[in-house]
Image (cartoon, helix red, strand yellow):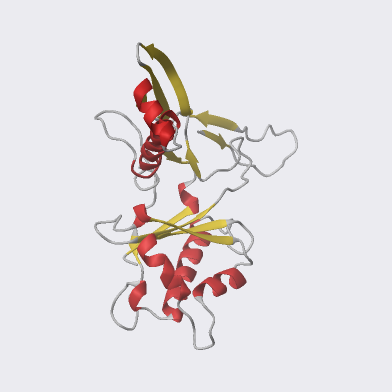
């Protein structure tokens, strides 16, 4: 992290004025590696060929999928092995705290029980909070944002008004198509058993050299072949990946709400 410091002073003749400076620090994360592999023998390959299958390719695809699942899981939940520092989308220590959405007329916060107007009010409140905590830098109608919703709640954005307009339609029109909606099952019951929703800017150009990312998923190695061993009646392969989870780089550009 790099912080520039300094403030301008009123100009006067023969005055040296103030001097700007800068401070730096390092936020560290721990790389976690996973390993998987496959082994195929000659008889197995021959039998698989009889049903027009490739045993090695199928196993190789299975290993690749298993490694992707592990990477995705760390991306959401991090990885706890004691003193390491590997966090995810749901538990990075710099994330802002959750707040429950407001209760509707039915005295419940759940979108399943809310009307079109009540759901859109929740989204407006998140947009307002994002604007305020960013110091008016993030206008959701001008800056690309993401509304990440728990999978079991996202379809309630199809709730319509008395005029047949859905919440999805309202989002697209109100925020000029700049707000995309995504869902993930990991957001189900993510906060003490309650479904959650995030609103965050995709990136923000603030003069930094990192591209302005709000979240960064760090993947040093997506898929790597460790080695191949020839056996007397087949062969064996081993694969690995590496991830340091997800880092929150601009927590002021994130709003988190719960109990939807």
The quadrant of the rendering that contains the C terminus is bottom left
* Residue drawn 43% across the image and 16% down it: 227
Residue 85 percent coordinates (x, y): 34, 32
**Residue 116 position within the rendered picture, expressed as x and y whole percent measured from the top left:** 45, 80
Residue 50 lies left or right of residue 13; in this view the side is: left
Give x and y (percent) for residue 79: 31, 35
Q: Quick one: 14 or 140, which is closer to the camera? A: 140
Residue that sits furthest to the front in the current view: 50
**Residue at horizontal 43%, vertical 69%?**
155
> Residue at coordinates 58% horizontally, 36% vertically from top-left?
210
Residue reaching furthest to the bottom: 162
- Compared with 106, 20 (above or below) is above
Give the quarter of the image for residue 46.
Answer: top left
Tell which residue pokes out farthest to the right in this image: 13
User: Is residue 244 in sight in this rendering?
Assistant: no
Horizontally, residue 18 falls left or right of residue 227, namely right
Above/below status of 106 relative to 77: below
Number of numbered callouts drawn: 0
């Amino acid at each position: 992290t790099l912080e520039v410091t300094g403030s301008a002073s009123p100009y006067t003749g023969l005055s040296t004025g103030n001097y700007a400076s800068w401070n730096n620090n390092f936020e560290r994360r721990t790389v976690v590696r996973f390993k998987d592999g496959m082994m195929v023998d000659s008889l197995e390959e021959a039998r698989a060929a009889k049903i027009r299958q490739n045993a090695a390719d199928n196993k190789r695809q299975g290993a690749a999928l298993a490694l992707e699942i592990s990477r995705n899981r760390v991306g959401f939940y991090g990885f706890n092995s004691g003193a390491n520092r590997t966090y995810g989308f749901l538990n990075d220590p710099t994330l802002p705290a959750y707040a429950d959405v407001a209760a509707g007329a039915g005295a419940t916060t759940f979108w399943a029980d809310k009307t079109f107007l009540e759901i859109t009010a929740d989204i407006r409140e998140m947009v307002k909070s994002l604007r305020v905590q960013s110091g008016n830098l993030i206008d959701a109608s001008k800056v690309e944002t993401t509304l990440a919703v728990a999978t079991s709640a996202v379809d309630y954005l199809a709730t319509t008004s008395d005029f047949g307009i859905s919440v999805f339609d309202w989002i697209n029109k109100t925020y000029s198509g700049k707000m995309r909606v995504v869902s993930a099952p990991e957001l189900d019951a993510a906060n003490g058993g309650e479904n959650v929703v995030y609103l965050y800017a995709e990136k923000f150009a603030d003069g930094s050299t990192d591209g302005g990312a709000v979240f960064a998923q760090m993947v040093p190695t997506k898929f790597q072949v460790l080695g191949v061993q020839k056996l007397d009646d087949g062969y064996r392969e081993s694969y690995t990946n590496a991830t340091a989870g997800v880092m929150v780089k601009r927590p002021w550009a994130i709003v988190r709400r719960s109990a939807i």
